[in-house]
Amino acid sequence: MAAQFGRRLRRGATTAAVAAAAVAALSASQAPGSPLVASDGDQPATGTAGSTPSGDVAASGNSPYFTDLPPLNTPNKPGTSVNLPVTGSAESGIPASILAAYKKAQQTVAGTDAACRLPWQLLAAIGKVESGQARGGRVDAQGTTLSPILGPALNGQGFALIKDTDNGAFDGDSTHDRAVGPMQFIPSTWATWGQDGNGDGRKDPNNIYDAALAAGRYLCAGSRDLALAADLDRAVLSYNHSDEYLRTVRTWFEYYNRGTHEVPDGTGVLPVESSTGTHPGTGPGTHGGSPSSSPSSSPSSSPSGSPSPTPTPTPPSKPSPTPSDPGGPGTPTTPTPTPEPTPTPALAAVQNAGTGELSATAGDAFAERIKVLAKSNLGKPLAKVSVTFTVVGDTDAAFDGGKKTVTLPTGTDGTVTAPVLKAGEKTGTFTVRATATGTSLPAVTYTAAVTARQADAIARTGTAELTAVAGQTFADVTARATFKGAAAARVAVAATMITDAEKPAENDKGPYFTDDDGNPVRTFVFTTDADGTLTLPKIYADGAAGTYKLRLTTAGGATAVIELTVEAPAA
């Protein structure tokens, strides 16, 4: 059985009083001002679209959770959290894969349930409280935790009583259920809401991409609009039905909304573990960190779960900003130099990576492919940045497979190349936009042009003279267009009756075509077949006897002139 969580709150435990006091103090300076909703009637029946499990069983089974609060000194960047600041407190850093999973879940849910307005910061807040951001980002390249994250057995001993529902398949416990994975789903809830967020064909509660998407869809259940405070509160309470849990999540949500930044996987800050641990296997270092690794300034709850009337002083986990006692008289002191902080790479910009001119003939693929480079605040290429390519404008051009939007990650060199772009039948210009997914960084814009198919030669395919008596019709006229010796398919060809002058113009006399209403017209536009051929509609002989000219002109400028002879009727 994998290690489980320490320093977490039991429902009804006396530690709630300590945590509540800390939340109240923090809320006075930075927590949202919206009222907390504690209604029991917000859980529709199981199994329906957009519903949550019925009864008192929340997504996590109301299992224990971390109660640490964020520092009182917030990043203080309201409205700019998507612009990931270059530096920030250690506590505001979110491991790269974990942050990517939250943003990908937000984007996926927005594509199917835009009315929910799910913010990735809410997923981050729940992930922080439930698992310390997957134990500080201890996940593999696919986003699966390096070891399972399991809550305690929900055996009714201080927790909810939930008997086994999965025969131990997810939690390894065939007697009672346990909350599983970085978002702490109980198996029965995962059976209904599990998702495949990373496209590997599996629904794994221990995979952050799968778990984050499942959490997003669960929070959006029941037609909720998470931009409304009341709906957001109901969503969080459906996850773990506790006002204390709601306050803790809301506090982290507000903290992440005011600024955060990406840190490497495995380096995220973990909540302080208790030395004895509430559950087996807990204690300092259980999740790859130690008590000293947390900069949280929130009060700690005692191991016994009851508040201590007199807090016992402990050594500070990091240097205090207040100058320390320099010592008694005659005691020399040597100041310890503060090491220069190592800047954390963060996405600063996306830019064109050398894409050439985008031009193609209608129906053909563009020879040039769009390429983007992601750069960090240190001026270096940045890998694993999600880039979204979008075809915009009045065009029927699209990427391979007919897709108008494609999202891909950058490689180790910081670049990513869009799929092959194929021109449609509509000519003219359009735009392709490349953006860093989920950010407000300026997009890279590319202009693409689609030109009409062309032919550099056209000729009549018959040789017989074209003669007709006035008032009758000519024999069918056929022609073939070519481009560089090959058949020119679907090329536009204009057929015009012209005058026999030095500068020919459209003739208003003589042979003519008819339009759909049967009216005479002397210019008609056709399109060649797949083999480059075309057959003109019926040509009517009219006017005085004599020789007239029909000119064929292709897109590309090739021309051919055909003679038509009108004979007078017999006496």
Image (cartoon, rainbow, N blue to C red):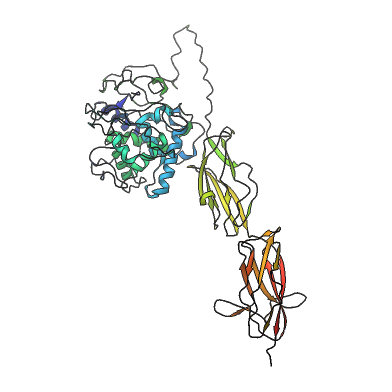
Q: Is 220 placed above or below 30 here?
A: below
Q: What quarter of the picture does the N terminus occupy?
A: top left
Q: Position of residue 29 (x, y in %)?
A: 37, 34
Asked which quadrant contains residue 532, the reply is bottom right
Residue 373 appears anywhere in the view: yes
* In-front residue for pair 223/303: 223
Q: Position of residue 191 (x, y in %)?
A: 31, 38
Residue 254 appears anywhere in the view: no
Q: Residue furthest front?
A: 464
Side (left or right) of 438 relative to 313:
right
Q: Residue furthest right?
A: 502
Asked which quadrant contains residue 63, the reply is top left
> In the image, what residue occupies the spot 42% across and 44% down?
108
Q: Is 223 placed above or below 56 here?
A: below
* In-front residue for pair 69/542: 542
Q: Residue furthest top?
A: 330
> In the image, what residue occupies the spot 63% across and 81% down?
473
Side (left or right) of 227 relative to 85:
left
